[in-house]
Image: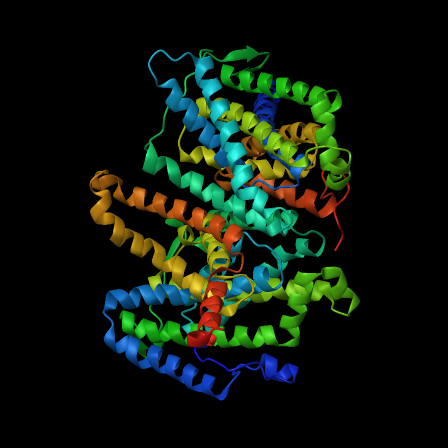
């Protein structure tokens, strides 16, 4: 009985922390969707790219960890700016399918690039936080997961302040709400589109550092992007709180499914359960838990 | 197709939609048929025939996806999963019950159509992004189920050996024999699609794509036609999967993973959304690309990479080129190769005297 409870509790704790780390990646998706209505199917590849940049920077002689994180952030911001300008701006006003397909194409490109430019082997991305698991009651967590949780909550706080209090954040919400009215009020809409992508770049950079140092950096890091969709659909596509709550739910469900179902079906429920949950959410509440109800019924 | 008309003299919709816009078009079609049934198979080497065979298989799948995404406007990221449904249905029927291909082929297609219609059910309530994600879920879930059900996937490695297709007691073994086998079905698929998109059903699909609410107002049952579109598209996908299985002699889930779905999306974007000729051009282009790439890169890349890395380097280059081409065509030429072909034709229409 006691063992049972302890098993369940440890699954729960690890699910919570992994879920919050999913939220970190989903945040990048939500930021872009919220401000620009663009759907980024290459969020996982963004994270992978950031991981590669950070790992390469970290392998340089005498580079402090903070330096490689800063380089990853700078590169991702520049990359997001360029992407918005070159690919997404010409697609403004085109059907939603065009943006989806363009980001799918971008994802394929980004997955193919590392092996032909810097080599596809798995790189380590060490962070100076040690790797002795920290015990929390009955469960124990590796420090990298705790770092991921801290970063997620920090970003949640920063973005909440940004969108509620800062002038730029309020302008960005206006852009998200109605582009034409925002334009009429003197907001430079295109600049805020670029800003939203840059913020997504920062989030992806942090996600890349955290996930890259947990899993190692190679092209398979991009697969993390597949977890983004269940998280954002469940939480609501345009809700930052939703990304966090959705991430937690997906993380916990995944962890429980892996703990209790895997022995019976031979593994793999981890990748399967989130999508089943997502299909159910799509049928009953497609705008998610916290999303705006503006989905058009057809 | 290749003729040059001297102007537009059509006075009725029937004339506008005719398969042969001018009498000479019959001769063009005849010439193309002769080219593909007589000249190509008897003059090309086995290796080139094998490339053409792969293209023929891809054309069937691309036509199916274009019916759904190009004509009906419903995006699907799960095309390869429907192919796998067809492939495994046919493989199981062929191996366990010993059925011939003329039963397993439609059976695979119908099974895929059924599964496709089920995956298409969310499209009744959601569209755009949500539908893309729902079909992505469909892809992953179908992949997982096939992989984790030994009764379907044949146990270890998730692959099933399939006997060669036999016609009148003759096994089709060589590339030349398979060429005719595939050419027949691809030809049927092309003609069927050309006629489908001219029919009431095809026009209803286009109406739904262009403006679904308006389509509903003019009396199109959106639910029925969306599901029909999913079913027809998946039927093509299933047939494509069966053909591929018979061609390879093995059903293997690795041939139907999500990257393959993206390949098919690339085909119809590069070829041209909502066009039969575009599906064909796109399928041929995407099938040829890695082969041409290999020929071009093998001497060059040897300077930079060790032989062990070659295959992964070529695969990655292919990914980069694919992604780049998808973005390029979306930004620069949304109507794809089909549009380029039309531009070339229009240029030559009045050619030496353009003014």
Left or right, residue B215 beside residue B44: right
Count of numbered marks: 0
**Residue A73: x and y, percent?**
50, 23
Up-down relation of residue B108 to residue A16 (above or below): below
The residue depicted at 45 percent of the width and 67 percent of the height is B280
**Residue A262: x and y, percent?**
52, 36
Up-down relation of residue A99 to residue B108 (above or below): above
- Pick the front one: A2 or B66: B66
The image quarter in which residue A37 lies:
top right
**Residue A234: x and y, percent?**
67, 37
Q: Is residue B137 visible?
A: no
- Pick the front one: B149 or B348: B348
- Pick the front one: A1 or B155: B155
The residue depicted at 61 percent of the width and 38 percent of the height is A230
The image quarter in which residue A215 lies:
top left
Residue at the limit of the structure toward the bottom, as seen here: B23
The structure's colour scheme is rainbow
Instruction: Please identify the quadrant where the N terminus of chain A is shown.
Output: top right
Up-down relation of residue A205 to residue B133 (above or below): above
Q: Is residue B202 visible?
A: yes
Left or right, residue B122 beside residue B290: right
Instruction: Please identify the quadrant where the C terminus of chain A is shown.
Output: bottom right
**Residue B232: x and y, percent?**
58, 67
The residue depicted at 31 percent of the width and 42 percent of the height is B312
């Amino acid at each position: 009985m006691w063992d049972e409870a302890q098993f369940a509790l440890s699954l729960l704790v690890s699910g919570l922390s992994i879920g919050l780390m999913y939220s970190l990646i989903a945040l990048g998706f939500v930021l872009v969707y919220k401000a620009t209505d663009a759907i980024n199917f290459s969020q996982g590849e963004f994270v992978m790219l950031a991981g590669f940049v950070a790992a390469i920077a970290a392998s340089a002689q005498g580079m402090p960890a903070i330096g490689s994180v800063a380089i990853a952030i700078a590169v991702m911001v520049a990359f997001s700016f360029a992407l918005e300008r070159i690919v997404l701006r010409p697609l403004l006003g085109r059907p939603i399918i065009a943006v989806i397909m363009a980001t799918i194409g971008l994802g394929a490109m980004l997955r193919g690039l590392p092996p032909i430019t810097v080599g596809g082997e798995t790189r380590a991305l060490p962070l100076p936080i040690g790797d002795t698991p920290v015990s929390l009651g009955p469960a124990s967590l590796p420090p990298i997961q705790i770092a991921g949780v801290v970063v997620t909550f920090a970003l949640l706080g920063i973005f909440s302040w940004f969108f509620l209090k800062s002038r730029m954040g309020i302008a960005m919400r206006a852009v998200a709400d109605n582009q034409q009215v925002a334009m009429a009020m003197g907001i430079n809409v295109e600049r805020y589109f670029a800003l939203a992508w840059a913020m997504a770049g920062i989030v992806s950079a942090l996600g890349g550092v955290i996930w890259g140092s947990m899993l190692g950096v190679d092209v398979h890091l991009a697969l993390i992007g597949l977890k983004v969709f269940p998280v954002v659909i469940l939480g609501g596509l345009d809700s930052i709180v939703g990304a966090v709550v959705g991430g937690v739910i997906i993380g916990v469900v995944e962890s429980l499914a892996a703990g209790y179902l895997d022995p019976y079906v031979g593994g793999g429920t981890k990748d399967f359960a989130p999508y089943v949950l997502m299909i159910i959410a799509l049928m009953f509440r497609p705008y998610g838990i916290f999303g705006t109800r503006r989905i058009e019924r057809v | 197709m290749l003729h040059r008309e001297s102007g537009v003299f059509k006075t009725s919709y029937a004339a506008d939609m005719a398969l042969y816009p001018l009498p000479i078009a019959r001769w063009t079609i005849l010439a193309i048929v002769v080219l593909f049934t007589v000249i190509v198979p008897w003059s090309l080497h086995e290796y080139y025939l094998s490339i053409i065979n792969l293209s023929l298989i891809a054309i069937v799948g691309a036509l199916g996806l274009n019916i759904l995404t190009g004509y009906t406007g419903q995006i699907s990221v799960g095309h390869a999963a429907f192919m796998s449904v067809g492939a495994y249905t046919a493989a199981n029927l062929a191996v366990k019950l010993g059925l011939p291909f003329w039963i397993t082929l439609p059976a695979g297609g119908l099974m895929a159509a059924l599964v496709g219609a089920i995956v298409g059910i969310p499209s009744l309530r959601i569209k755009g992004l949500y539908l893309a994600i729902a079909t992505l879920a469909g892809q992953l879930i179908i992949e997982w189920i096939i992989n984790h059900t030994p009764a379907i996937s044949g146990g270890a490695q998730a692959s099933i050996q399939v006997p060669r297709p036999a016609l009148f007691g003759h096994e089709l073994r060589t590339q030349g024999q398979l060429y005719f086998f595939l050419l027949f079905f691809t030809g049927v698929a092309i003609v069927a699609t050309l006629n489908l998109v001219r029919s009431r059903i095809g026009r209803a699909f286009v109406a739904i794509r262009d403006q679904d609410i308006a389509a509903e107002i003019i009396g199109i049952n959106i639910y029925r036609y969306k599901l029909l579109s999913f079913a027809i598209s998946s039927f093509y996908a299933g047939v494509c999967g069966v053909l591929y299985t018979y061609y390879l002699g093995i059903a293997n889930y690795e041939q139907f993973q999500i990257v393959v779905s993206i390949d098919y999306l690339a085909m119809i974007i590069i070829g041209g959304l909502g066009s039969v000729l575009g599906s064909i051009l796109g399928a041929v282009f995407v099938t040829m690309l890695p082969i041409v790439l290999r020929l071009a890169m093998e001497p060059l890349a040897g300077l930079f990479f060790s032989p062990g890395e070659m295959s992964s380097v070529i695969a990655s280059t292919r990914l980069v080129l694919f992604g780049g081409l998808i973005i390029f065509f979306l930004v620069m030429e949304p109507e794809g190769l089909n549009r380029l072909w039309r531009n070339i034709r229009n240029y030559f229409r009045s050619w030496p005297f353009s003014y």
